[in-house]
Amino acid sequence: MKTESRGDRNERVRAAVRSHIATLPVPPPDLARVVARAERATRPRRRSGWVVQSAAAAGAVVVCATGAVVALPQNSPHRIAPVISPDRIPDFARLAGPEVVWPDAVRRLPSELPDGSAYQVADTTDGDDLLVVPDGRAAGPLFFNPDTGAARAVATASVTDGLNAPQVTAARVAGDRVVWFLKGRREGNTVREAWSALVAGGQATHLADLPASATDGRVVLAGDAMIWEQYGPGQGQDDVVIRRLPLAGGPVTDVPGSRGYWLSTVPGWITSQYPGTPFGEPERTGTLIEVATGRRLQWKANDEMESTVACGPQWCTGATVGGYIALQDLDGGSYLDLKERGSLDPSLDGRLAIGGVGERNVVWDRGSGKAAVIVQQSSGQDIGDTSFFRYGSDPRSPVRTWRGADGTLMMLDLKRLW
């Protein structure tokens, strides 16, 4: 007896449902959306951001982006409002690489630090140094110049006195200082601590002891403070709050009114949108809050948006009933269907759109209209050490890193695109 595969059976059922809908005088929109959602559910889901691969023969490290970001000054070019216009849409099928589109923002990276350690890029500085997190050998973040090979510790080893199995879970540059979260065990208990030190060097400052429930990795800057998501003991969507720690030190407090909010993909903003499963009823309205100022923005989805839209302070992105990427303004206007499958996220105060378009990983500057495609090492290569997944590729990160077709590690500094 021939057995029908699950894929064939699913396709047969979907085809039958579509045929039934087509016979109805007025196809029920909810059922049409259910079908579209079911079709997308059968396709492999793309990770947001970029997948970095390493060759097993070299035993080399992979370099990845963390969730760390830096504050943007009021006159930052990132704040230029992008225009939703068909003439600003690039030809996604014919994009060049970042080294062609933004040559001054691309750097080639060695596969390991001078001591042989694997590492991850957390942030960039105004100079040539990168802020990196070594894997396994050093306890704290380092400044590393990939051109000269010079590396220096951000803080002295005294930071980790009495700390077993230390691990940096987030690190970033905040003006003239570096701030980082450190996880480990003291006297048999798991601890999380926040530290700060001057970029120029000097004694590190212990900012605060953090609760064990503080999330790792997804920590961003909001004005003169760090913020992150923290979950309570409950199971519901609302059992999360945004926590705040001043960069100058002080108590860890809740951001007022942030119960039930999450970090937006645009650093410094939080959103009422639930970032969980996409298969529930899509949210049609929501609120964005800029933590540093308290400014609140309302958004609503265009009627053509099938899924919950992801919004920054200037524009939103989502998917049509047909599964294509679409853009809109916060009020639902200026709707534009890209006629491409995938997903995009607002980044760097909303000027950039980052994500997957078709089979391509793209960075799109919606202010200038320029865009580039990240071309990974050819598929089928052994991924090797997967520790870079600890941070993941987050649209909040100021860098994109990848392994090129020839195996070279590359980095795009998003803060230097202008």
Image: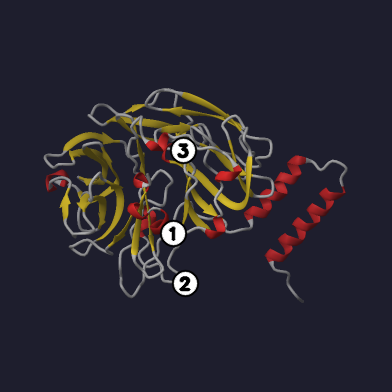
Pointer 2 local density, CA inside 10 Å: few below 14, some 14–19, many at least 20: few
Q: Nearer the viewer, residue 416 or 40?
A: 416
Numbered-mark total: 3
Please give the residue where the numbered disc 1 appears in the rendered image. 97
Residue at the spot 23% in from the left edge and 29% down from the top edge: 249
* Residue 300 vertical placement versus 275 (above, below): above
Question: Residue 317: which numbered mark, if any?
Answer: none
Mark 3 element type: helix
Pointer 1 local density, CA inside 10 Å: few below 14, some 14–19, many at least 20: some
Q: Earlier in the sequence, mark 2 or mark 1?
A: 1
Pointer 3 local density, CA inside 10 Å: few below 14, some 14–19, many at least 20: many
Three-letter amino acid code at the position of disc 3? Gly
Three-letter amino acid code at the position of disc 1? Gly
Residue 139 at x, y percent in the picture: 20, 51
Q: Earlier in the sequence, mark 3 or mark 2?
A: 3
Please give the residue where the numbered disc 3 appears in the rendered image. 350
Q: CA distance from mark 3 to mark 2?
A: 34 Å
Three-letter amino acid code at the position of disc 2? Gly
Q: Nearer the viewer, residue 339 or 293?
A: 339
Mark 2 element type: loop
Residue 298 at x, y percent in the picture: 55, 26
Please give the residue where the numbered disc 2 appears in the rendered image. 380
Q: CA distance from mark 2 to mark 1?
A: 21 Å
Mark 2 or 1, which is nearer the eye?
1
Contact flag, marks 3 and 2 (Cβ < 8 Å):
no
